[in-house]
Structure formats: C-alpha cells, structure tokens
Amino acid sequence: MTRLSDLLSITAPLKDCSVRGVTADSRQVKADFMFFALPGVSFDGRDFIPQAIAAGASTILTTRGAKLPEGCPVQLIESDDPRADYARVAARYYSPVPDFLVAVTGTNGKTSVADFTRQIWKRHGLISGSLGTLGVRSDLIQTQGGLTTPDPMLLHQSLKQLAVSGVTHCALEASSHGLDQRRLEGVHIQAAAFTNLTRDHLDYHANEMAYFKAKERLFTEVMTEEATAVINIDSPHGQSLAEKMKNDGRALLTLGYAEGSDAQILAVTPHASGLVARIKYQAHEEDYRIPLMGSFQAENALAAALLASTADIGVRQCLKSMESLRGVCGRMQYIGETAKGGAVYVDFAHTPDGLKTVLEAASKHATNSLDVLFGCGGDRDAGKRPIMGEIAGKLANRIYVTDDNPRHEDAAAIRKQVMKGCGKAQEISDRGEAIHQAVEALNDGDILILAGKGHEEGQIIGDEKIAFSDIHTAKELLAVKELQ
Ligand SMILES: CC(=O)N[C@H]1[C@@H](OP(=O)(O)OP(=O)(O)OC[C@H]2O[C@@H](n3ccc(=O)[nH]c3=O)[C@H](O)[C@@H]2O)O[C@H](CO)[C@@H](O)[C@@H]1O[C@H](C)C(=O)N[C@@H](C)C(=O)N[C@H](CCC(=O)O)C(=O)O
Ligand SMILES: Nc1ncnc2c1ncn2[C@@H]1O[C@H](COP(=O)(O)OP(=O)(O)OP(=O)(O)O)[C@@H](O)[C@H]1O
Ligand SMILES: N[C@H](CCC[C@H](N)C(=O)O)C(=O)O
Ligand SMILES: [Mg+2]
C-alpha cells in the first residue's frame, strides 16, 4: 500500500495517509486518490477540484493560492511547479524501472535514434526497449503509441512494465511539449542525445528560441549531473548546446559532418540497398555499410551508436553494430515496386526540414522522376504548410497534395495553404485516392515518397479517428504480401 510519505516529503500540517492512485484527470479519480490540478492549454484542472473531491480524492496538489471549500477534509498541497511534482510523484509511484535510461530530443530523428539504440544494445546482449512515437517496443512488449513523450503516469507505468519483463536498458523520446510540460521530471536519464533543430511546433512555442529552450532542458535540467550528452553539432543550436555542455564540465560526445566532431562523418555514399558511411573516430577512419535508405540515416545511426556506447560498451563496437541495423516502421520504408518499375516508400516527414531531407536523400536513388505525396496536420503549426509546399515544388517532379490528419481544421483550407507554396501540385483530398493516382503514374526508375503519416494507422478528422494506413494502402496497390 502506497503512503503519501512514499511519494513526497511531508511536513506538518500535512498528515500521512494511504494513496490508492495518482492522476491529473478528475475523471479518473477514485477513493483515496491524489489529484494534481494542473492549468492546461484547453482546460484548467483547478476547475475540476470539486469533482475530484466528490469522487473521493484525499489529497490535492496544485498551484499556490488555490483554496478548498470551507471545512473540506481533503488535504491541499500548494506548489510552484505542480507539473514537475506530478511527474516526480509518478516516478515514485511506479517502480522498478529499467536500470539504464537514455533520452533523445531534436526536431527530426528521435524515433529513429531511439529505435536504433535499442537495436544496438540488443546486439550487445542487453535486454533493451524503446518508448516514444511508436509506443513501447521490446522483444516481449509492443504497444501502440499515443504521445511521443507520454503523460507521466503512463510513462512510468510503461517503464515499470518494461522493467518487470526484464528490460534493463531503455531509450526514450523527449518531445519539446513533454520537456516543457515536465513529463520527464523524475526520470533518471543517464545519457541524452540531440539530433537537430529546425522549424516545428510554432503553434505551441512562442518562437524558435523558446522551442530550443524547451529541448535544452533535457540537458540542463532533466538528465543527471553525470550523464553524457551526445550532440550532433551540424546545426547552430547543436553547436551552442555542445559549447554549453563543455563549459558546464559535462561529459560530451559530439558527432556530425562538422570538423572536430568526436565522431565525424567524412562521406556518405548511397547504394541500391543502403549506405556506406566513412566515419572518423579517434583519428581512425573506417567505412561502415549501413543497410538503411536515406543518407540522413547515417547521422541517426551514428547518434544511436554513441548513445548506446554510454552504457559501458566500446564506441567502436557500437559503430560496427550500425551494419546490422534494421529500418524503422514508416521511416523511409521501402514498400515495393510497380509492374512498370517505379519504387514506393513511406516516410514520416512532417516538417519542412524532414521533407527536404527525405527528398534530397531519395533524389540520389531515383534515376527518373522523384514524386511526393503529402499534406499537413491540422491543429499544428500552420506556418510550415507553404514552406513544405515550396520544398516539394523545388525538389519533386510530380506532387500530390492531400489530407494528413485534419483534426479540427477545414481540410480544404489546409491544402490551400500547402498549395500556396507549390502551384504545380495536383490537389486530391482523399488520401487513398491520391495514393492510387500517384502509384498509377509511376514509370521505370521513378521513386514515390508517401510522406507525413509513416507508421500511423488512422486519420484524425474532428474527434474521430478512421482506420487508414499509407503502408497498407500502398502494399495493397502493389500487391505486396503482408507478413502477418
Ligand atoms: C498541448 C498539449 O501538449 N497538451 C497535452 C497536455 O494537455 P493539457 O495539460 O494542456 O490539458 P488540458 O486538456 O488543457 O487540461 C488541463 C488539465 O485538466 C485536466 N482535466 C480536464 C478535463 C476534465 O474533465 N478533468 C480534468 O481534470 C486534464 O487532465 C489536465 O490535467 O497534457 C495532456 C496530458 O498529458 C496531454 O494529453 C495533452 O496532449 C494533447 C492531447 C496533444 O495533442 N499533445 C501533442 C501536441 C503533443 O504533446 N505532442 C508532443 C510532440 C510530438 C513531436 O515532437 O512531434 C508529444 O510528445 O507527442
Ligand atoms: N536526422 C534527420 N535529419 C532530418 N530529417 C530526418 C532525420 N531523421 C529523420 N528525418 C525525417 O523525419 C521523419 C521522422 O523521423 P523520426 O520519426 O525518427 O523523427 P521524430 O523526431 O521522432 O519525429 P516526431 O517528432 O514526430 O516524434 C523521417 O521519416 C524523415 O523524413
Ligand atoms: N508528433 C507529430 C506528428 C505529426 C504527424 C503528422 N501526421 C500530423 O498529424 O501532423 C505531431 O504530433 O505534431
Ligand atoms: Mg518520434
């Protein structure tokens, strides 16, 4: 039985009591629960304090200045940072967790790096897992994802489930929302990686600097003092973060094309079935055959190798393991070829830089036309839409603008904003129909990238999620057999 004193330090007038559950959602409260009343984006959790009390909450933790009804027997705890307290309490509520936890942040590449890190550990005989956009992944557990960095209670519940199943090493994705909302406070992060930072989520963060500052928290406030920072220094933000880590005397491993990186990429040569990356580490140069499509994957694989090495494995051994990596679901995933010889890939590019990166990478493999099909999600950064249109206009030949997850926005209005950037595109609202037309148009040597939805198995329209998958749709069109 959990006691309040197991979850936080209590001093008079607070009294110890049993806690039968912890939640930040009044609708989940039951007798003897601890309720965290958090001001949010759509609601203010403090408005639901009466409901939580009626449902049986025995303790409420919220912002300073909150008042409970006169004579109410419920204990009130005031806090300067109730979200951080919520996460720390969640961490104490669920144990054990895997012994060695690392996290990955950055605009693009988090899922890929987390998954590759899990794979490299496995290769070295460790029982490993990953947790993020794809959900929870280990040899024994596979659950669908919701948020990239889940709500603290779900996060710690998942970490416990992994630990109980034997997982000792786990890589987590740290989203900017998650870091800003303190979802990772209380997680014992022993190494953290930074991939890159480009435009995204400016609907949520005030500007790019605020977006970066949220990501930076992983290194300056969340990871442990002794943790190693693994930083791709090819972007200005990566450079400045690495500088900061150095000045603060933190353990640091840098990577990238940049001269002076601890692990420097000297060249990446694409091949029909993958890449050859020439990497310099401690004055020694070596070619690694990485069986992944898209030259950007060399950076992700290298970040994963360095991150995995922080668990006391030699860097060189981890670098060698890049040669047995498998692609990640929905990230530059090869689906198949049409009868005429056009190749189809599904990718999760949903940011301007992601789209540019994937199209540039694919152009190295296309001997004929490079085609792209994409849309933009609703209730997300609208400013990126015309920019993505422009990028497609510059880098692709046939362009199909279609619906992504419109959520609560007018899908036609979203498409119009994308089309502003690329007049030459065909606009086809129905995504299934658009994929059909795009596949039909392929000729020998063409490459088609279906971008933006990757692994997703649904399309969110309003509050509804209808079953839809780019992967299944394309496989059906190409008559590729599903392995299940
Ligand atoms: C903008 C955002 O990030 N919102 C997240 C946040 O919601 P919030 O705290 O603002 O919640 P709110 O709905 O305003 O409600 C405030 C409080 O009142 C409570 N409440 C509400 C109603 C009620 O009846 N009773 C009650 O107690 C809520 O539980 C909450 O504690 O905290 C919630 C609980 O953890 C999340 O579910 C919710 O994610 C929403 C659904 C979401 O779509 N988030 C996306 C944008 C997100 O987080 N994405 C990132 C980025 C991915 C990437 O890098 O690309 C991710 O990590 O996935
Ligand atoms: N290192 C990279 N640099 C630029 N673009 C990348 C990189 N890695 C992946 N991408 C692009 O971003 C897409 C998403 O990759 P991934 O899922 O690994 O990123 P993520 O950061 O986890 O995304 P999310 O924020 O949605 O969780 C890929 O499908 C690819 O198009
Ligand atoms: N983690 C990203 C995924 C976006 C995927 C894209 N399909 C969309 O819906 O915009 C987000 O929540 O912004
Ligand atoms: Mg992700």
Image: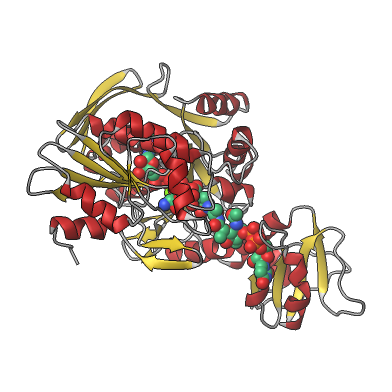
Q: How many marks?
A: 0
Q: Residue 444: where, in percent of width, then height?
A: 9, 39
Q: Is residue 403 left or right of residue 372?
A: right
Q: Is residue 102 left or right of residue 293?
A: right
Q: Residue at x 37, y 22 (%)?
A: 257
Which corner quadrant holds the N terminus?
bottom right
Extreme residue in the left direction? 339
Q: Residue at x 59, y 45 (%)?
A: 203
Q: Residue 319: where, in percent of width, then height?
A: 30, 34
Ligand 1 image-quadrant field: bottom right
Q: Residue 421: where, in percent of width, then height?
A: 42, 34
> Which residue is nearer to you in this view: 279 or 165?
279
* Residue 173 visible to an observer of this rendering: no
Residue 239's place in the image compared with 419, above or below, is above
Q: Residue 171: where, in percent of width, then height?
A: 43, 50
Q: Residue at x 45, y 44 (%)?
A: 416
Residue 171's place in the image compared with 109, above or below, is below
> Which residue is nearer to you in this view: 49 or 326?
49
Instruction: Residue 448: name its quadrant.
Output: top left
Q: Is residue 427 left or right of residue 64?
A: left
Q: Residue at x 27, y 20 (%)?
A: 285
